[in-house]
């Protein structure tokens, strides 16, 4: 808020805010100040994920029927792990706002809406497996307010169905993020652990050529790869941030802002709000929509 008032361009970590109401205030601030803004949903800049976007936008999948995503970790299983402070703020609801819903599923939600459009409604369940943890700052045992696990069903505005799941209690997984999209003509699957491959199946392939193929994103005409030498060599996860900064700067030069913007981040926060509300109410909850600017 202070940076916007001072006329500074802002690149903000995700999720944009603790909740949708706070995010709305932030959007109003940057738009009133007319400052360039971006949110760090960096998975959009994985070359294989960007290629998935291109394939969908070209209509190669046809009508989308299903979207399914998961993001699994295992680092908070120990009951002796404290909450709060510089290293463990993610476990403190007063600082984080939520648990895996805002931390991990927010990534999945942003990617999903970028690829497949707005989410209309959700029904969810969450769980906090360890109810109390020592707080790093106070030194006292305090109630845990964040969600350790979250799963929800969703309906996109285009009619497609979706499942989303995230947990920090999946032993053996450090950052297993995958998504699969099933369309009328083709399907795609992506796995962060093999981030430069996009699995692709096209029903229109003929005879013995029909089957799942593994597209290795290596060539100069693939997204972002022309900027690296030699294109065929692997680039790392960290380069997604380089791609995002590069797009941000290019947008400044061209006068065409690159996403995800604060307004995009607000859309994701509205979904996570609906997920958390549904987990409490036990009902389907409508997602508040963000108007196009």
Image: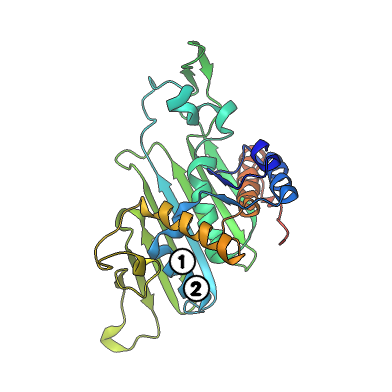
Q: Residue at 40%, 81% (x, y): give it.
A: 203
Q: Position of residue 172 (x, y in %)?
A: 29, 40
203 with respect to 2 (left or right): left
Q: Residue at 51%, 65% (x, y): give it.
A: 66
Which residue has dot 2 on it?
56
Which badge, 1 or 2, comes first in the chain's sequence?
Answer: 2
Hey, which quadrant is residue 95 in on the image?
top right
Packing grade of label 1 (10 A; few <14, some 14-19, many >=20) is: many
SS category of the residue bearing label 1: strand
Foreground: 30 or 234? 30
Packing grade of label 2 (10 A; few <14, some 14-19, many >=20) is: many
Q: Position of residue 249 (x, y in %)?
A: 52, 58
Would you say the residues marked 1 and 2 are in contact, meaning their CB atoms lie under 8 Å apart? Answer: yes
Q: Give the colour scheme of this rendering.
A: rainbow
Label 1, label 2: how far apart the Cα atoms are: 10 Å
Badge nearest the viewer, 1 or 2 = 2
As drawn, 135 above or below 192:
above
235 with respect to 15 (left or right): left
Which residue has dot 1 on it?
181
As drawn, 64 above or below 293:
below
Foreground: 258 or 209? 258
């Amino acid at each position: 808020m202070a940076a916007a008032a001072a006329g500074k361009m802002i690149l903000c970590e995700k999720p944009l805010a603790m909740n949708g109401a706070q995010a709305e205030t932030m959007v109003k601030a940057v738009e009133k100040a007319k400052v360039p803004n971006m949110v760090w949903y960096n998975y959009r800049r994985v070359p294989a994920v960007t290629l998935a976007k291109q394939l969908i936008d070209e209509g190669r999948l046809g009508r989308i029927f299903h979207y399914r995503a998961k993001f699994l970790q295992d680092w908070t299983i120990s009951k002796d792990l404290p909450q709060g402070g510089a290293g463990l703020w993610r476990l403190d609801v007063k600082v984080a706002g939520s648990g895996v819903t805002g931390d991990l599923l927010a990534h999945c939600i942003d990617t999903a809406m970028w690829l497949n459009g707005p989410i209309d409604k959700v029904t969810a369940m969450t769980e906090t497996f360890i109810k109390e943890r020592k707080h790093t700052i106070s030194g006292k045992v305090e109630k845990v307010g964040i969600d350790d696990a979250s799963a929800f069903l969703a309906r996109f505005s285009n009619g497609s169905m979706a499942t989303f799941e995230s947990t920090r209690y999946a032993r053996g997984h450090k950052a297993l993020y995958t998504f699969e999209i099933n369309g009328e003509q083709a399907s795609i699957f992506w796995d962060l652990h093999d981030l430069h491959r996009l699995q692709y199946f096209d029903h229109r392939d003929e005879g013995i050529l029909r089957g799942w193929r593994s597209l290795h994103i290596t060539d100069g005409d693939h997204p972002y790869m022309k900027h690296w030498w030699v294109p065929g060599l692997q680039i790392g996860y960290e380069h997604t941030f380089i791609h995002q900064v590069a797009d941000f700067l290019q947008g400044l030069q061209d006068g065409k802002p690159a996403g995800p913007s604060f307004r995009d981040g607000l859309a994701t926060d509205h979904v996570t709000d609906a997920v958390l509300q549904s987990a409490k109410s036990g009902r389907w909850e409508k997602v508040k929509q963000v108007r196009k600017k």
